[in-house]
Image (cartoon, rainbow, N blue to C red):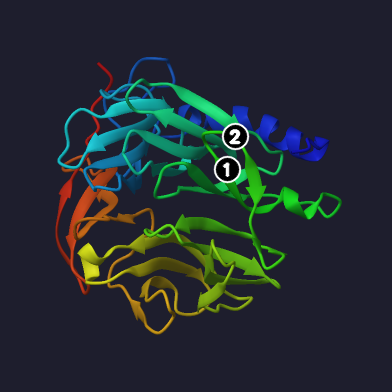
Amino acid sequence: MSRRRSYIAWPALAMPLFLGSCEKSPVAPVKPDGARRDTLPRFAQVDYPLSWSTDGNLAAFRRCVPSSYGGPGLYVIPRFGGKPLYVLPANIFWPKEVRFSPDGTRVAGVWNFSLFIADLRTGRVDWPYYTANGVGGVDWSPDGNTLLLSRRFYLPEQPEDSAGVHLFDVRTGRDEVFLSRGRHVYGGDPRWSPDGDSFAVVEYTDGAARVAIYGLRDSSLKIVWPGTRADDFENLQWVRPALFGHLKLAVRKYVGERQGSYLMDPDGSRLERLPYSIFFSALSPTRPELLTLGWSGADSLGVVGVDWVSEDRVLWGRRLTAWRPPQ
């Protein structure tokens, strides 16, 4: 993995800006005179939901302001609430793409385009993978031995293997590019299938975005949603049978016509619009629950909520986190 000056400079310069974002934002709980603030402006967004564990019993979220939980950070909280576990520092932008290992003991994610792996039992955080091309997306293999990574940047003078989807063995540190019959795959939101035989990805090819599934054994390609040059997608996720009866994919289309959140059969045979948004949301792998943006009571702060959903509506919701001033 080569280090080219144009890519080393950009993350290094960006980090101080990102680290300072919360402290300089209007929701930071510090007054201009330096005194602590015990309230936040109404409708301030303090939490961003990220993901569920594979058993649906833990949820990860990003809190970008100090609170009674502790400093701004990535936290993990039980499904029914309680005291969150602090994992590592966070701000309004980072970390992203936080994914639980299959056994729920580790999380992997992206902080300022760098991969981290945090052990929830010991508190240890490792940064095992550096690339000047930046990490854009990450997901665990079902056996917990390999990470599926999408590299974020690419320059024409670089080897083509420097970008695209890669497979990173967390035991040995070996990294290899994924090729589909000799062709590189460029995209975001790489998501390993529950059976481990394939992965879904928001792929960019010939100037257009599409949702595709690639076989890991035979390098086969299945186009689920063709897309056009006027389309783009985000928040791709597998939806297991516990929710809608059989395995599906969910995605949010945020550019082009027919914007909204959708369910898709993996073979591309059926596409249906969801009546609720999966923007900053994650569908539970084990229950009809949606980890989503929520609002606290009288102060109307943006925190994490859990909605109980069906295929056609939100049935009810509850607040999972709350904001109180630092102790």
Which quadrant of the view contains residue 245?
bottom left
Count the numbered circles shown. Answer: 2
Compared with residue 22, is residue 136 higher up or lower down, i.e. above or below? below
Query: Residue 99: where, in percent of width, then height?
Result: 41, 44
Compared with residue 159, is residue 256 higher up or lower down, i.e. above or below? below
* Helix, strand or loop at mark 1: strand
Within-10-Å neighbours for mark 2: few <14, some 14–19, many 20+? few
Which quadrant of the view contains residue 282?
bottom left
Compared with residue 139, is residue 127 higher up or lower down, i.e. above or below? above
Q: Nearer the viewer, residue 7 or 217?
A: 217
Q: Is residue 200 left or right of residue 113?
A: left
Q: Nearer the viewer, residue 173 or 270?
A: 173
Residue that badge 2 annotates:
173
Q: Is residue 82 left or right of residue 198?
A: left
Dot 1 amino acid type:
Phe
The earlier-in-sequence mark between 2 and 1 is 1
Dot 2 amino acid type:
Gly
Is residue 15 at least partly visible in the picture? yes
Quadrant containing the N terminus is top right
Query: Residue 301: where, in percent of width, then height?
Result: 27, 41
Marks 1 and 2: in contact by CB < 8 Å? yes
Is residue 45 at least partly visible in the picture? no
Q: Is residue 85 left or right of residue 224?
A: left
Q: Is residue 254 left or right of residue 9?
A: left
* Helix, strand or loop at mark 2: loop
Q: Residue at x 21, y 51 (%)?
A: 306
Query: Residue 151: where, in percent of width, then height?
Result: 64, 49
Q: Residue at x 33, y 25 (%)?
A: 86
Name the disc covering residue 168, or none: 1
Within-10-Å neighbours for mark 1: few <14, some 14–19, many 20+? many
Q: CA distance from mark 2 to mark 1?
A: 7 Å
